[in-house]
Image: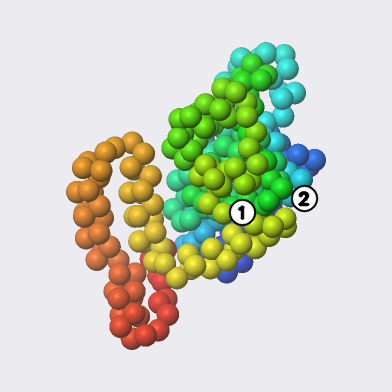
Amino acid sequence: MTSYTNLRLEKIGHTAIVTLANPPANTWTREGLIDLKRLVTDINEDRNIYSLVVTGEGEKFFSAGADLKLFADGDQALAREMARRFGEAFETLSQFRGVSIAAINGYAMGGGLECALACDIRIAETQAQMALPEAAVGLLPCAGGTQLLPLLVGEGWAKRMILCGERVTAETALRIGLVEEVVEKGQAKQRALELAKLVDKQSPSSVAASKKLIQGARHQPPMANLPVERELFLDLFSTEDQKEGVNAFLQKRSAEWKNG
């Protein structure tokens, strides 16, 4: 099996499980970011994979983000490369053709939270805490945080977390829309896998097209995307999934997807 720096990949059925594994705090390195991009690209090519679960190794951290030692000497060339690596990695994760679920099992700070923001769904354990504290050390979130956080929690809470450095608990994250569900300690990965089993029942072609439309709404008003929605609906009629899905329903059996 292919190996990836600071990442562990496991496949269960139609689900890929990616564990952030750079103890003690699962921080991101240059090599880890390069390999996250490579890993997501690899599983995008595996048509047997419909969903992706991301979680952290251990009980304390999902990910603490970048190792600040990298930026201690103010090297702008290194900072430029790291910003690019973060952006490329998390944008690739965001564009995964299936459903991505962040199982936040502990602290998700800075680039750790931005990794979760790049996922489609976020599940947090009750002890988890989340923050974008970059401004406290003279930096700013450069991997999507300033853009994706306001989409989920609104401008006010985004400013509280980014401009004031406010850290939020799992309970607050649920209330403001940062996460979709809170579970007991140690249960995030299992709950994510349960959601992934629901994804197994969905047509991969339909999921990919629907995700494209939903994320497209971030950039364009509904009137611009409604015609695209209708076109993508019609495009599904050229897939085997469409025929299989309708006939499986009429025949009262489980669908067997082929398009992926």
Residue occupied by mark 1: 182
Q: Which residue is drawn at 44% across and 37% down?
A: 151
Q: Toward which corner of the image does residue 83 lie, by quadrant?
A: top right
Q: Is residue 65 above or below residue 118?
A: above
Which element carries disc 2, helix, strand or loop?
loop
Question: Residues under labels 2 and 1: Cα distance?
Answer: 18 Å
The residue that disc 2 covers is: 58
Looking at the rendered image, the quarter that the N terminus falls into is: bottom right
**Callout 1 crowding tier (Cα within 10 Å): few <14, some 14–19, many ≥20:** many
Q: Nearer the viewer, residue 51 or 239?
A: 51
Regarding mark 1 in the picture, which secondary structure is present there? strand
- Identity of the residue furthest to the right in this view: 24
Q: Looking at numbered disc 1 in the image, what kind of residue is underneath it?
A: Val
**Which image quarter holds the C terminus?**
bottom left
Density class for disc 2 (Cα within 10 Å; few <14, some 14-19, many ≥20) is some
Up the image or down, 22 lies above or below 146; here it is below
Locate residue 7, reporting x and y percent: 68, 47
Q: Where is residue 116 in the image (x, y as percent from the top left)?
A: 57, 43
Indicate left or right for 122 with 253 as reference: right
Residue at coordinates 26% horizontally, 38% vertically from top-left?
221
Task: Give me the disc on residue 197.
Answer: none
The residue at 48%/29% (across/down) is 156
Q: Does residue 200 appear in the picture of this structure?
A: yes
Pinpoint residue 119: horizontal percent, then vertical percent.
52, 47
Amino acid type of the residue tagged 2 in the rendering: Gly
Query: Percent x, y for residue 165?
Result: 62, 26
Determine whether 140 is above or below 94 in the image: above
Q: Which of 46 and 190 is in front in this view?
A: 190
